[in-house]
Amino acid sequence: MNEKIRMAHGSGGDQTSALIRGLFMKYFRNEWNAAMNDAAVLPLSGQIAFTTDSFVVDPIIFPGGDIGRLAVCGTVNDLLTSGSLPRYLSASFILEEGLPMDVLESICVSMQATAKEAGIEIVTGDTKVVSGRGGLFINTAGIGEIDGEPFDFGQVQVGDAILLNGTLGDHHACILSQRMEIENDICSDVAPLVSMMKALKAGNVRIRGMRDITRGGLATVLSEISEQTHGALQIREKTLPVKDSVASFCKVLGLEPLYMGNEGKAVFIVDGADAEKAKKIMQSCTYGENAEIIGECVPGKHPVLITSVGGKRRLVPLQGEGLPRIC
Amino acid sequence: MNEKIRMAHGSGGDQTSALIRGLFMKYFRNEWNAAMNDAAVLPLSGQIAFTTDSFVVDPIIFPGGDIGRLAVCGTVNDLLTSGSLPRYLSASFILEEGLPMDVLESICVSMQATAKEAGIEIVTGDTKVVSGRGGLFINTAGIGEIDGEPFDFGQVQVGDAILLNGTLGDHHACILSQRMEIENDICSDVAPLVSMMKALKAGNVRIRGMRDITRGGLATVLSEISEQTHGALQIREKTLPVKDSVASFCKVLGLEPLYMGNEGKAVFIVDGADAEKAKKIMQSCTYGENAEIIGECVPGKHPVLITSVGGKRRLVPLQGEGLPRIC
């Protein structure tokens, strides 16, 4: 077997999926990870959720955030996907020799503030140093507490509504702008969605499931969810919020917001009868002002986009390479 | 602040300690991590232990093991230090472009086998790809279940015995030999110590505390433990087991086994009355055949080495740089 790891293996799209299914799941499959959800639900006295993510974003500081805020939000949002409330976080640093100490300090400050905002406590950590070019990688693992039943996309049924908490593509467009040294006012959307989740639960919204939209974008996420749902997830292009600045950026570069990564956006699938209530609650939350009902679950099997001109297009996962080092 | 990260910050010695105390603890301190133990003990329904470690060893495959076995054992052994039984593991990969797939597969095979041996389940994971030279980093975070009281070095008292489960310096000497392309038969000692811990508990040995001996070596570990114990930890140089091949290697290079990293060795502090029983149990276990009682807790404050010629020397933590990328 002479195949080598390529950048596409980290894209979050089909090649990543092939790597996980073909290799990691070949060896690691068990009853806890077989569903390949973002967080494992573990029977340990009560039920806890446990998840991990490594962050390699380049540049490490960008408009709207930095690798530290990203590392906290990414894992916190992954914990939310299980229906758990984030409680405990680990933080493990791989530091490249030459990383300025004040940069590292600013990242710690950012992590502390973000953890506080998200209501999670950083309880354990590790530090390694390697040679390199003065950057760093951060791994965070998280534990969440499950009160009630974990979310289950297997419960999604025809008539359920699909909601999105805001504009697509911000983080992706921000990182790419930085990488290309394009000057604009695009900021990353990196944010923890804990208070929004709490508000939805407090409002008795019947949430079937939630997924944060990172590498691979909304299209990839919906494709993955569709493997678990009964019925087809159908969204309408004209309801998808995209900021003007991001839309212009995408037009120039030929990018498709449906496949762009975000770090503070999620799809929520809720009981159809609760859709309007959920939208109002989300719009009242920080990070939810542009929330929209973007579609619904209809009879069928595959996820579908109703285009702006009324056509129907099957949604497929991201193919090939995504933007490397986006998170 | 223009200080930069240097290799010494990752040595596990004084500079690492300074970084953790001066920076990470400045921002992250809370009641769960204030003791700066290897694993956090968390009240979550019952009590669980939660720990994390990133692994950057170079070379990634070495005599006696590989980065995958290391990543499982390191976190498993850290969980044991809290008195917990390892239950769940996360595995997060940062892969460098160009890593041969068969190498990655062999590492997965190794992780699976080691997890099985240690009785822990890999329940969640993540994959990123970065440019580089075809290597990889692995982060593992672990959750352990605490049955009874967690270990507490604050319970150590005068008269307690200090035991070591085998020879010092094997992993360090192995990695350094590989790095220097020196041909010898030195193998890493990388191993999970779960069955040994279970045997000691089953034998009703009153264990006060346990610490695995990795970066910084036995001297650094005893110095760190001493900050929590009542009384001074005193060990005898002539009781410290070192393999002939490792001793020769150290002599040639002027290395001191007390400061060398291991990956399957730990100090156990037990009630003095249980010392002989503990030694016999350890010697009957895989990875414990060379176990020895190496010292005891005596009146005093600082850890002490009684040298082979009968002198006394205060043990201090590793100063400056250790061997980079040893784990």
Image (tube, coloured by chain):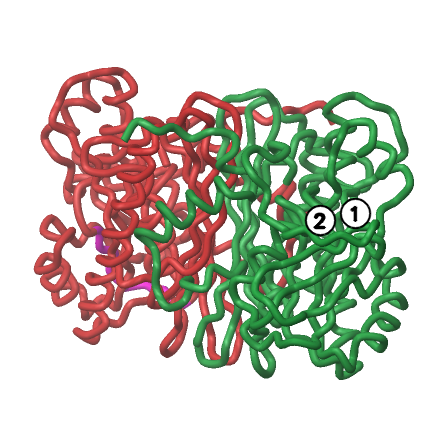
Chain colours: A green, B red
Q: Is residue A223 positioned above or below A258 on the image?
A: below
Q: Which chain hosts label 2? A: A
Confirm or deny contact between disc 1 and disc 2 (CB under 8 A). yes
Circles 1 and 2 on the same subunit: yes
At 45% across and 64% down in the image, what residue appears? A35
The chain to which mark 1 is attached is A
Answer few, some or many: residues within 10 Å of disc 1's Cα (few below 14, many 20 plus, some between 14 and 19): many
Residue at the spot of label 1: A189
Q: Please provide percent x and percent y for residue B120.
A: 32, 62
Q: Which of marks 1 and 2 is nearer the N terminus?
A: 1
- Specify the segment rendered in magenta: B155-164
Q: Is residue B24 magenta?
A: no
* Secondary structure type for disc 1: loop
Q: Residue sitting at 50 percent across and 31 percent down?
A: A129
Question: In the depicted view, which residue is nearer to us: A156 or A144?
Answer: A156
Out of B263 and A42, give the one closest to the viewer: A42
Q: Where is residue B247 in the image (x, y as percent from the top left)?
A: 15, 28
Percent from the top left, x then y, of residue A96?
A: 55, 27
> What residue is pinned by disc 2?
A263
Q: Evaluate whether residue A217 shows in this view.
A: yes
Amino acid type of disc 1? Asp
Viewer-nearest residue: A37 or B214? A37
